[in-house]
Each structure stands twice: as structure tokens, then as C-alpha cells.
Image (tube, rainbow, N blue to C red):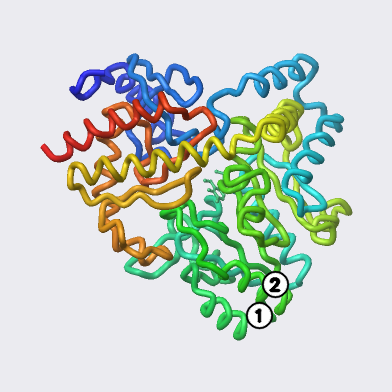
Amino acid sequence: MSDAVPQRTRSNELHLKACERTPGGVHSNIRLAAPKVFFDHAEGAWLWDVDGNSYVDYVLGQGPNLLGHAPKSVVEAVHEVSEHGLILGGQHSVEIVAAESVCKALEWPDMIRFGVTGTEMVQAAIRAARAATGRTKVVRFEGHYHGWLDNMLVAPRDGVWGVASAGQLGSHLDDVIILPWNDAEAVAETLRLYGSRTAAIIMEPVMINSGVIEPLPGYLERVRQLCTRYGVVLIFDEVISGFRLGLAGAAGYYGVTPDLATYGKAMAGGYGVAALAGAAELMAPFGTGEITHAGTFNGAVPNMAAVAATLNLMRDDPPYDHIAEQGTTLMAELRTLAAKHAVPLRVAGLPAAFHISFGDPNTVVTDHRTLQHLDLARYEEFAGMLIDHGIWVAPRGVWYVSAAHGPDELDETLARFDKALINLLN
Ligand code: PMP
């Protein structure tokens, strides 16, 4: 690629055309902030747009492409079953294989329900917690994302967390308590006051959506203890961390077991599947009809085949050591490059998912509030330059690494990153 900003003439034309029928030209608001690039195809850790530009991909479809784009054996498994029917309106034995594979990989849950999106599985989790406890309140944390529905979407306005979208009512959050994360005392105090009225605590066990911030030592354990003491259902939202941090997700990685957990993204090799898993006593009421959970596409044959094939791949040839190695190398090399140019860049998080921002690399970041000490807006601008230089990244600074990232991808990334930094400084 030349140093010049790439031509995206065809993408721009398509975007204008898309806007005629689709608000903003995108079908998910998460994509509104990114440049409107139309892709032609993807392979491994690479994307090519309709103008012929290549990108090393660190968005990975917002997480699903943990094994790289379109893993062959997953696509083949889906094709094979698809020839014989897609949605049968009854059951297919591949559902059993998928359920068994996921529960075995995760180790802790007894039962699982499949759906299509993480957003809806979070709702199922909250409903199950309220049904089991007969309580109303849900504790959640600043900066965590649990889907876009009325009772879970929040944003800060003038330092106060509340509704995030036009059309969302303040009353939707009446039963939601929003706390800063990584503050065990705040949880303890809240449960002292409201424990008997609290159904659930929901969290990303590692706050990947805002800054990839890990739990402080002992934090998850303490929250687990408090939930047990007050009879509160602990829900881990593992829609990103599940199958990314390891086969057993964040629960396995940190050694803390929730009562319920949601999964999605990396579980199905790029196909649209999500799940709620948990202990039998919490999950069984879905089976008696006491708790409603439904969905036309839940358990669709191709989706279940995708889960089964993805889990097969992950079990037979675990990608985690490779991802950890590549991610660790990449994080270190990016820091070295920034130091070479005397740019204050902070690269932090986990090798499988890390965060880049401008600011003092030694800034202590433990929650959404301290994350604001970094210059996130400058990175957002820089992300546009990275994209112009052929590195596909999200504006909010989270980079995902896949099994398909190897030395060639890293070399190319570093060369392109170097040029983007030079561009930034000019
Ligand atoms: N929970 C978390 C932690 C997520 O990151 C996301 C999506 N990024 C969701 C839930 C919602 O999942 P979906 O977009 O599939 O509805």
C-alpha cells in the first residue's frame, strides 16, 4: 500500500446508496462511529474492501472471528446440514451435540438455552434471576455493555449514569442500580441496603467493552461471596470473554463460578448464535414453561452445526496459546513503536483482547471513571488513520487477536502502524 490515504470511491458510493434505505447506512449503531467501508471478502485475519484495499483485522466482527474468518470446517459443517433443512419447527440431534459441547467446554453449567443475540440472552438471564428470587433489583456497572434493550442500556450524562437513547424511559431503569466496577465495598454496601430486594448482579467479568479492564485481585471472589451471602444471582456476561479467554471463558480464567452466564460471538465461528447457561435449578423453569424464553431461529440447524463444529475445532486444536503468544508480542511491539516516536500510547489488557489509548502508559485504570484519565478522543481520531493505513480497528480502542494472526500479520501490522504514527506526527 502506498503512504497516501487509500481511495474508497466505491465504498463511498455504496454508503450513499445504502443510506437511501437504511438509516445511517448501517444495521447496528455500533458501526455508526466507524468509517463506512464496504468489504468484498475476508480470509484468515484479513479483510479486503470493494476498492481493493487490504486490512489486517482486529475487529473480528466485534469478536466472533476468534478462529479467523470463515473457518473451513465450520463453514463445511453448516453447508452439509443446510442442504437438508434449515429450521425444522421441531428438534434436531445436532442441538444435543451443541449443548453438550458447550456445557462440557465451560465445565461449570448444567444446562443451556440457545438464542441468536447476546442482548436477548441477557434478558433471559435477568428474568431467570427475578423468577428464582422473587426480587426486582439488578445491580450492574458503569461502562459494561449488556445489549441495547431498555433496562440494560446506560450511558453517562454529566457524570451521572442513566438512559442512553431517545425513546428509552427513565422508569426502565427504576430497578437498576449502577455502580462503579472493581469496588467491592460499593457492592457490599449496596447489598447491605438492598440485598433482600436484589435479584441479580450482572457484569462483564473482565470489562472488555470499556478499556479491557481486568478485575482487581480478589474482586470477583468477593462479589461471588456477597452474592452467595445475600442470595443474589451472579450473572457473568461472557458474550465477549466466553471462548476468547479460554475454552472455559472468564469463569475458567479467573476461577470464579457464576450462577448464570451469557455467551455469543466466538462460540459459533461467525454464525449468529448466543446462549444462556447455568445451574440446573435456575435453568429448569425454562423447561416447565414457568419462565418464557422463545425465538423462531433459536436452535436453527445451521447455527447448532456451527456451534458444534467451532467447539470441535477449539477442543481438538486449542488456539489459546497461539493467541496469547501473538497478542503478547503485538502489545509489546506496539509499545516499542510508540516509544520510538515518543508518542504516549497506553497498550493494556489481555493478549486476546487489549486496549489502546493515548495517555501515560502508567496510568492506573481500574474502572470507567479512571479510564477517562486517558485521551480516548485522540485515539478515536487515530483509529481513522490506522484504518487509512490498512489496519481495521474499532474507534473505542479495543483490539481482538485471533488464531489466524501470525508473524506475517504482525509484521504487516507494525509496518502499517509505524506509518500511521508518522502520519499522526506530521
Ligand atoms: N454483552 C456483551 C458483553 C457484549 O459485548 C455484547 C455485544 N457487544 C452484548 C452483550 C450484546 O450482544 P449482541 O450484540 O449479540 O446482542
Q: Which residue is mark 1?
A: 195
Q: Residue furthest bottom?
A: 193
- Circle 2 residues within 10 Å: few <14, some 14–19, many ≥20: many
Q: Position of residue 218 (x, y in %)?
A: 57, 70
The CB of the residue at mark 1 lies under 8 Å from ligand 1: no
Q: Which residue is mark 2?
A: 232
Q: Is residue 303 left or right of residue 349?
A: right
Residue nearer the viewer, 106 or 35: 106
Residue nearer the viewer, 8 or 4: 4
Q: Residue at x 34, y 43 (%)?
A: 395
Q: Quadrant of the N terminus?
A: top left
Residue nearer the viewer, 417 or 302: 417
- Circle 1 residues within 10 Å: few <14, some 14–19, many ≥20: many
Q: Residue furthest right?
A: 288
Q: How many numbered dots are placed on residues in this image?
A: 2
Q: Position of residue 170 (x, y in %)?
A: 49, 66
Residue nearer the viewer, 150 or 78: 78
Q: Residue at x 62, y 46 (%)?
A: 242
- Where 185 sits versus 309, above or below? below
- Residue 398 lies in what quarter of the image? top left
From this viewpoint, is residue 303 visible?
no
The CB of the residue at mark 2 lies under 8 Å from ligand 1: no
- Where 80 sits versus 209, above or below? above
Kind of residue indicated by mark 2: Val
From this viewpoint, is residue 262 visible?
yes
* Measured Cα–Cα span from mark 2 to mark 1: 7 Å
Query: SS at mark 2?
Result: loop
